[in-house]
Amino acid sequence: MADTNKILLGDDRIPRTWYNIAADLPEPPAPVLDPGTLAPVTPADMAAIFPPSLIAQEMATEREVAIPERVRAVYALWRPTPLYRARFLERALDTPARIYYKYEGVSPTGSHKPKTAVPQAYFNHLDGTRRLATETGAGQWGTSLAFAGGIFGLPVDVFMVRVSFEQKPYRRAAMDAYGARCVASPSAETAAGRRILAEDPQCTGSLGIAISEAVEMAVNNEGTKYALGSVLNHVMLHQTVIGLETIEQMALADAVPDIIIGCTGGGSNFAGLVFPFLAEGLRGGRRYRVVAVEPSACPTLTRGAYAYDFGDTAHLTPLMKMRTLGSGFVPTGIHAGGLRYHGMSPLVSQLLDLGLIEARAYDQTPCFAAGVTFAKAEGIIPAPEANHAVRAVIDEALLCREEGRSKTILFNLCGHGHFDMQAYADYFSGKLEDRAYTDEDLAQSLGALPPVTAA
């Protein structure tokens, strides 16, 4: 079994519970605060935008949360996802490293996002929601929620960051095909969008702005709820299916990872893979080296402050303690649109603060170079976001070659790049630019953080 190139488990091996890492942390997560009173938010405070079932999961303290059978039935359309040994990449790099990757691009929408879109649509349907509003960066999340909304009969409005709206027309077409309505953000449909456009009619948008628009729509329209594709605890919870499956698959391969790598934007695909592995060390067992990889143009983990901040630009959300670049941050238009959020999941941020994970940042052109190397060797063209993980994997594998040491590297290939070929075309034609977030920009953005003690 250890020599097989592909390990694919049967439908009966889809996990029956999600894993909640909050139950095993040495310190409880910092409370989410009401921005007016600075008191911890209550379920009643969250009811305007989320349904009761998801609020309960957001605040859950138990280690395991049951996955409803109707959700597992939809998961069975593509799960369990395959675990591959990247033998051709190993050969191309001439490395003694053993490289494994969990491939989430086999989902109906081509990324890891349906794992939380499906339960969010299901629980909203169960709790009587009539419509969903959301944001999307590169479009993976918007496409996935459109897919899930169609399954459970929920119309979906998607505010897509304008630069990605223009860069990725086929993502918009996919949302249309699933029955959703996609709007470029900032838009004239909300007060938040109109305010941004009045200040900057050419604004390229940000996830913070798009979140403001979606939240505003949910608050102002009865029967509409907001759905978020990353960052929040219940989203991290749903994504742990990735790691739970991978642990069993790695055991079948008779392999144990020395290094686990994932790209990070809001934290969902990274958390999905690594949280179940970290659970072992949190309970006194094996500890793994875990690396989170982000773009230099949006260096939330590597250069952000660990502080309380708003999750959106218009300050409609509660305050969360997280790694942040400031809610007013507007990133450059890098093609990894899913990694352009100003904040990081509070749970992932806490793990970094506790020293349980490490972080690094890359420019986009070396990441695309890594993606091309991977595609030539393994045949899969990675999404721009996933290229960040691939870059780190290749660097670690080359280090193994230099040192003459063999290590087992595991990473999450969180989606394919079939909707992102314009990004590759720009790379091949030399149009991609590497723009780091300057110290001046960082200081200005962090200077506007709310005056809340981060301790």
Image (cartoon, grey):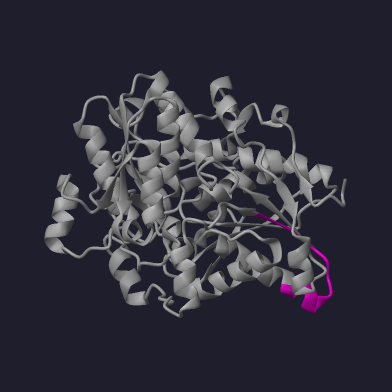
Can the viewer see residue 284 in this picture?
A: no
Question: Who's the residue at 60% across and 42% down the image?
Answer: 26
In the displayed structure, 98 sits above or below 344; it is below
Question: Who's the residue at 50% across and 52% down the image?
Answer: 349
Residue 390: image location, x then y, percent: 62, 64
Residue 23: image location, x then y, percent: 59, 34
In the displayed structure, 163 sits above or below 134; it is below
Residue 166 shown in magenta: no
Q: Quadrant of residue 391?
A: bottom right
Q: Which residues are magenta?
A: 398-411
Residue 402 shown in magenta: yes
Can the viewer see residue 320 in this picture?
A: yes
- Left or right position of 136 against 296: left
Question: Who's the residue at 61% across and 56% down the image?
Answer: 357
Residue 403: image location, x then y, percent: 80, 76
Question: Who's the residue at 29% across and 42% down the image?
Answer: 317
Most foreground residue, 39 or 432 = 432
Most foreground residue, 157 or 296 = 157
Check the image and name the residue furthest to the left: 198
In the displayed structure, 324 sits above or below 47; it is below
Residue 424: image location, x then y, percent: 49, 68
Most foreground residue, 16 or 157 = 157
